[in-house]
Amino acid sequence: MAERGAMLAPMKTWVLFDWGDTLMRVFPNCAGKMKDWPRVEEVPGARKALHALHGRVGIALATHAADSEEADIREALERVALSSFVKPIFCLRAVGAKKNTPAFFAHVQERLHASPNHLVMVGDDFAEDVEAARAAGLWAVWFNPRTPENAAGDRYTTIHRLEALPAVLMGWGLLSRE
């Protein structure tokens, strides 16, 4: 029980990044586990965005990649030196549900001890990342580097460069200025 007049710590904000084509490039000619691909690359701006957020919010990865388990994903992230930024990894095999289902986001909320108001999903697939997250009550950011199309509404918006993410989070009051 908190002391009378004691301030409760604010709930931590978590940013959930999609994996393929949000943090790491997907090469259509490669199959199987990304950790085994002959070539892997980070998405342009990923490192800069992760660095800007690191230590200010929790950073997690949320994917329904079918070929990889958590250790495989971690190994792929290590190949591009992004692993140290990402703490928990939520994947199809570990969660037992696809990212576009309520069960996936319920699992994430439970594991992170976070309410939907403190979770932000960032991904390149509007239906799989934005609409699914919004259906679960989360904030959502559509990362759309391929077209000038913008979509925005209640608790969601579009960015075309990952470096724009901190400003969006500050605008929503989910990230303090440092």
Image (spheres, rainbow, N blue to C red):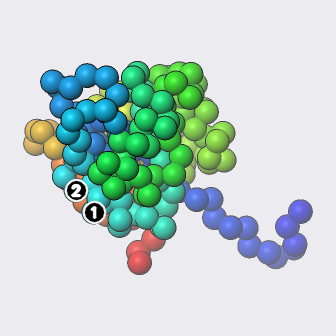
Is residue 156 in view from this perspective?
no
Residue shown at 41% from the left, 75% from the top = 177
Could you tell me how far apart the alpha carbons at marks 2 and 1 are, in whole angstroms?
Answer: 5 Å
Q: Quadrant of residue 123?
A: top left
Mark 2 neighbour class, 10 Å CA radius: few under 14, some 14 to 19, many 20 or more: some
Foreground pick, 36 / 55: 36
Percent coordinates x, y for residue 91 in the rendering: 48, 31
Circle 1 is placed at which residue position?
48
Relative side of 53 to 114, left or right? left
Percent coordinates x, y for residue 55 in the rendering: 48, 67
Q: Quadrant of residue 6?
A: bottom right
Percent coordinates x, y for residue 153 in the rendering: 33, 42
Q: Quadrant of the N terminus?
A: bottom right
Label of residue 45 in the image: 2
Give amino acid for label 1: Lys
> Is label 2 in contact with label 1 (beta carbons under 8 Å)?
yes
